Image: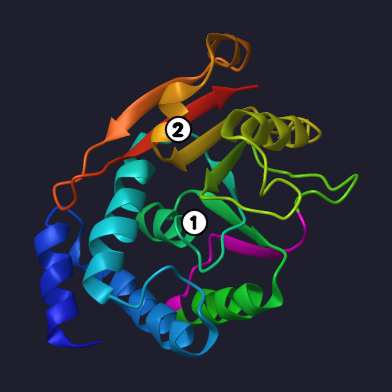
């Protein structure tokens, strides 16, 4: 990576120990290199990725609790890999159904030495598939089965699918403003709590949401 990236990381994350910032820098190097040929993240703008995706994942990581997590539809590993780097004591399962993502994640896991990461190639919606962690993470999750659903109905479908796995006790969402428009019935039924993740870099913010099962 260029010096510019390390400078940005130092400025954005002064509280992260240097050794962990270096691992994040190496992850970004792999991610952006792979993205050039496989288009696996939303932007090739390094500064945007750091200040939007990595920063929000860092704040998200500070809000979650638990020891075992499955990042469903992880794609290129955001937020799962960031959580794994920052929390070597937590076990992170990275789950995705697309082989392009899985191939990248296996390379990243090996090259970064992430011993607390397990990778699963699986469609979350396949019948009888069982998660084995206590917590599930969703960030901008999409699937053709739910792509056209209204936001609340989409969340209900996703959470009800999670309920098939008896080990899961909590669902955490890194999401946008639609979470503020959920019905009172949804909030009550799913014991929803929401916190704003304020961005110092963008006028728009993401939100942390917790659902208790």
> x, y (%) of residue 206?
34, 41
* Picture quadrant where residue 62 is located: top left
Q: Residue at x 37, y 35 (%)?
A: 207
Question: Can the viewer see residue 121 in this picture?
Answer: yes
Which residue position holds label 1?
80
Q: Residue 54 location, x and y as percent?
A: 32, 59
166 to the left or right of 93: right
In-front residue for pair 121/206: 206
Q: Vertically, is 142 above or below 208?
A: below
Residue 112 is situated, as x and y percent measured from the top left of the image, at: 44, 76
Q: Secondary structure at mark 1?
A: helix
Residue 141 vertical placement versus 62 (above, below): below
The magenta segment? 112-123
User: Horizontal placement of 50 versus 95: left or right?
Assistant: left
x 51%, y 21%: residue: 182
Helix, strand or loop under label 2: helix
Compare residues 62 and 177 and report the one nearer the observer.
177
Q: Which residue is mark 2?
A: 178
Note whether 66 is above or below 189 in the view shown: below
- The 10 Å Cα crowd at callout 2, few under 14, some 14 to 19, many 20 or more, is few
User: How far separated are the C-alphas under marks 2 and 1?
Assistant: 22 Å
Q: Earlier in the sequence, mark 2 or mark 1?
A: 1
Disc assigned to residue 136:
none
Give whichever of 14, 147 is nearer the camera: 147
Q: Nearer the viewer, mark 2 or mark 1?
A: 2
Which residue is painted at 25% across and 66% down in the image? 48
Snapshot quadrant of residue 161:
top right
> Does 114 appear in magenta?
yes
């Amino acid at each position: 990576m260029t010096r510019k990236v390390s400078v940005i990381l130092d400025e954005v994350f002064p509280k992260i120990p240097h050794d962990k910032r270096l691992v994040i820098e190496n992850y970004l190097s792999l991610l952006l290199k792979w993205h050039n040929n496989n288009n696996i993240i939303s932007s090739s703008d390094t500064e945007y990725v750091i200040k939007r995706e990595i920063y929000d994942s860092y704040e998200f990581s500070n809000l979650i609790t638990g020891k075992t997590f499955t990042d469903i539809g992880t794609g290129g590993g955001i937020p799962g890999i960031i959580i794994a780097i920052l929390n070597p004591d937590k076990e992170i399962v990275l789950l995705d159904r697309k082989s392009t993502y899985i191939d990248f994640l296996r390379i990243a896991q090996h090259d970064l030495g992430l011993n607390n990461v397990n990778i699963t190639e699986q469609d979350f919606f396949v019948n009888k598939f069982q998660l084995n962690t206590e917590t599930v993470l969703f960030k901008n999750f999409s699937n053709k089965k739910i792509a056209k659903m209204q936001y609340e109905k989409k969340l209900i479908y996703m959470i009800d699918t999670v309920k098939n796995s008896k080990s899961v006790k909590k669902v955490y969402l890194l999401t946008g403003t639609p979470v503020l428009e959920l019905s009172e019935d949804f909030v009550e039924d799913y014991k929803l709590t929401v916190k704003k993740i304020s961005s110092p870099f963008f006028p728009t913010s993401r939100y942390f949401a917790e659902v208790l099962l």
